[in-house]
Amino acid sequence: MSGVAFAERVLHANRKLFESAHGWTIKEMYSKDLQQDFDEYAPTTMSQKSLSYLTSLDMMSGQEDRENIIRARELGKGALTKPFRLLESKHLGVVFTFAVYCTDLHDDAKKEDRIKATAGYLGGAFDVETLVENLLRQMAGSQIIAVNVYDITNETMPLVMYGHTNVEKSKNTYVSSLDFGDPARRHEMRCRFKEDALPPWTAISTSIGIFVIAFLVGHMLHASRNRIDKVEENCRIFQELKMRADDAVIAKSQFLATVSHEIRTPMNGVLGMLNMLTNTRLNPAQLDYARTALASGKALINLINEVLDQAKIESGRVELEHVPFDLRAILDDVLSLFHGQSRDSGIELAVYVSAKVPKILVGDPGRFRQIITNLVGNSIKFTEAGHIFVCVHLNEDVNNLMDGDEGEADDTLDGEVESAGPLTDMNYRFNTLSGRETADYRNSWEMFERLLAQEKSHRSGVDQDTRNYCDLNGAVNLVISVEDTGVGIPLHVQDRVFMPFMQADSSTSRNYGGTGIGLSISRSLVDLMSGEMEFVSHPKVGSTFTFTAELQRVPANVPEHILREGRNCYLQTPPLTTCFQGMRVLVVDGRKVRCEVTRHHLQRLGLRVEVAHTPGEAAELLTTTVDRGNRGSRDSQRSFATDIELIFVDKDAWGPGTWVNFRSLLTESFIGQLSHNQSGLTSYQYRSAAGRLPNGYPTLNSMKKMVLVATSMNEMELSVVKASGFVDTVVRKPLRASLVAASLEEILGVGDGGRDQGQNLQGGINSLQNLLTGKRILVVDDNPVNRKVAAGALNKYGAQVDCVNSGRAAIQSLKPPHNYDACFMDVQMPEMDGFEATRLIRKAEAAAVDNWQAGRFSSFGRRLHVPILAMTADVIQATSEECMRCGMDGYVAKPFDEHHLYQAVAKHFFGPN
């Protein structure tokens, strides 16, 4: 036997999924071209090495194999082909085929049942020519006996399987039947002397030899058949074991989901009550105890979530969503999560997204956020000083630059920054976000600058170009890097970084905390996004984790407001203000990378941004020539550029604390320019005459508004902000577009800028207080503790809350017309769960519309369609999908926090009352 192979049955509806899972396409057997579309296929997936060339070939594309496969699966027995030329050897041979079924079938099972239960086909190939030649080599080589093997299924037209001549039966012909195991086909072997009859002793010995040969051939065929039977039995056992394993995985997943719900439900009560306790009057020690308990509870919840995610990934039950989302809004959310930790430790935390990345993409926003959160969280944990920088570019742009740089050793680890001002600390000598050394040269300023050049060429006619770029259909391949200047990863453990529950050593968990599972989950999620994750790390320098992800573009003919109407999407909420469109501002920062990051966030608000890296450059941009006569005459004067309205200065523009002297440095640069003007005034004369010069000349009091941008500020620094010429409002990093907008409104006295700065820095314009004040909300939960927690959390933000304890009570309360603005519905409740209650509420709303159209009543109450948000401790993916299917508008996992609560309700109503 040449070998054994297994071909899997694949229906056309499952073809793409099958090909994607195996990484190859189904091919036609003889031409090996891409197989055309048919109802079903039988591609070879497993084989012995001798038949490895059959992998991916469709066995049903060969006429003989197709007939044999169909006969084998309909009969439930082994089937043998008629003789044909085998693929590789081109020898005559036969294939013996068994059908492999998913379940045990009775001998009298119907043909339709057998076809439906077929999982695949097990086949053994017999090279008859090689088989007989090996057995008869010596006798055939002595020119004594001629041997022929026939398929005599059709006796009138026997098919020659071996031999070159047709040997007719005669008195000198010895005939022996052969059994290949298929009763539907008959075979025989014919032997004769090539010459006249031999002496009796020769004839006797020859006859004995022929008998022995025939016996050996039959024995080998019988052994081969038994071998195929054994392989088929093993395959059936493996199929059964696989089904049991799948059932066990499902049971494990359901068990984990149930256990998680049982753990998270009381934890929701614990965390909710602790959170309410922290808002009561406590002395400092009591407040510290409550906050410590709250932090410990949140850590436990995070650990439960990570273990559940790892279990679902291992069982292959993680499915990605495909919904529209704003990638920049996702990154802003991640920055908001870590802004407190970064400010407390003085770490520079920043995000930059290339202008070539479309505003709205299609993918799984939750899983994308989870990856970024894991990576940034690790960086925060292992970084004590310096920066954490998240960068997003198109993969093709980065690859093009890397291909062009192949062979070049332009590594920023050895390249120091060209000084743009006084450097006061050797830790700030590198041309990076914070001036500290980094691990991966691919994030160097040189690479960053070249990517910026591509973006600027793309920006020419920015609106039209961006629109044309986003009109393209298909995938968007992104490359996202998270760079930090932390402790780095020891070289001897870098090969096991992505293994679950593995850390560098036992001290890592003691010193920094964590379970070592986040990176494993992140890489698995990246794999699901058709991407790859890698890292570069140097001990005591830092680490850079980079991953790619394949997302989709939104069709160009779908406007953004249509996307916002969809329930299952994640966009900037509320939309960014447009009241600053066209305003011209100046950013002053000696750190070039950081300067571009600030420019990026300002441009998101529509501002026109100029940048300066030195006070001299700033002075040049802030002055413009005003002609009062002929150009170049004494009447040609310099004055402040009237269209630059704000100057943003980084706190550490040229090193720590250099911001204090910026006003004086700028003034000196400006006076130096004026002293060489045609007025003939020296710097001393200008200072002496300040405030008394003719109209058109600037004075020291005519400076533009200067805004300080800082990661952290101590009390002493805050006290000198105004004395140094800056406005009261300090824009705190990490920068986000909504935060910058809130600060600008306060500085310029527009919009809601009258609110206090603290509120602007914490939550942007529309905080939960603004969203929920005066809103009437129904809470549905069978657990009294959960009702108390939910009501307390919503009351805290000004909502009027009513509670009911069952789905039936919710249906009565929300029967149109009603006076509720929203409903928070528990999913798992006795008698009637949240899913069924929501379906009945939606039916009642539909009936109300019919009644209104029929004129039976004229009012729906507050809302025709009341937003229903699921709240559940069950975080399994199927629960989220069921929420959407039954008509719910959103999903909040218990215990919900302020950030997630805001995201859930903001799309349904925002703004005061």
Image (cartoon, grey):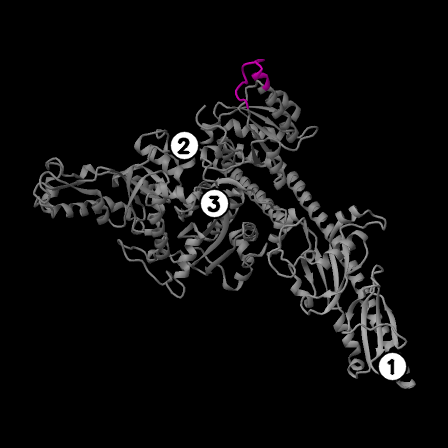
- The residue to which callout 1 is attached is 206
In front here: 129 or 344? 129
Residue 161 placement, left or right of 548: right
Tell me how far mark 2 sits from mark 3, CA to CA.
35 Å
Q: Position of residue 753 (x, y in %)?
A: 35, 30
Numbered disc total: 3
Q: Position of residue 191 (x, y in %)?
A: 84, 75
- The residue to which callout 3 is attached is 473
Query: Splitting the image into 4 quarters, where does residue 61 fall?
Result: bottom right
Tell me how far mark 1 sits from mark 3, CA to CA.
77 Å
Res. 735 in view: no
Single out the residue that lies furthest toward the right.
200
Earlier along the polypeptide chain: callout 2 or callout 3? Answer: 3
**Residue mark closest to the camera, 2 vs 3:** 3
Q: Residue at x 81, y 81 (%)?
A: 139
Earlier along the polypeptide chain: callout 2 or callout 1? Answer: 1
Discs 2, 1 touching: Cβ within 8 Å: no
Residue 903 placement, left or right of 203: left
In front here: 871 or 243? 243
Q: Position of residue 663 (x, y in %)?
A: 23, 44
Q: Look at label 2 and name its amino acid.
A: Ile
Q: Quadrant of the N terminus?
A: bottom right
Res. 141 in view: yes
Residue 641 placement, left or right of 780: left
> Residue 765's mark?
2
Q: Residue at x 88, y 74 (%)?
A: 170
**Most frequent secondary structure within the magenta stretch:** loop
| Circle 2 SS class | loop
Q: Look at label 3 and name its amino acid.
A: Asn
521 lies above or below 762:
below
| Circle 1 SS class | helix
Q: Which residues are magenta?
A: 850-864
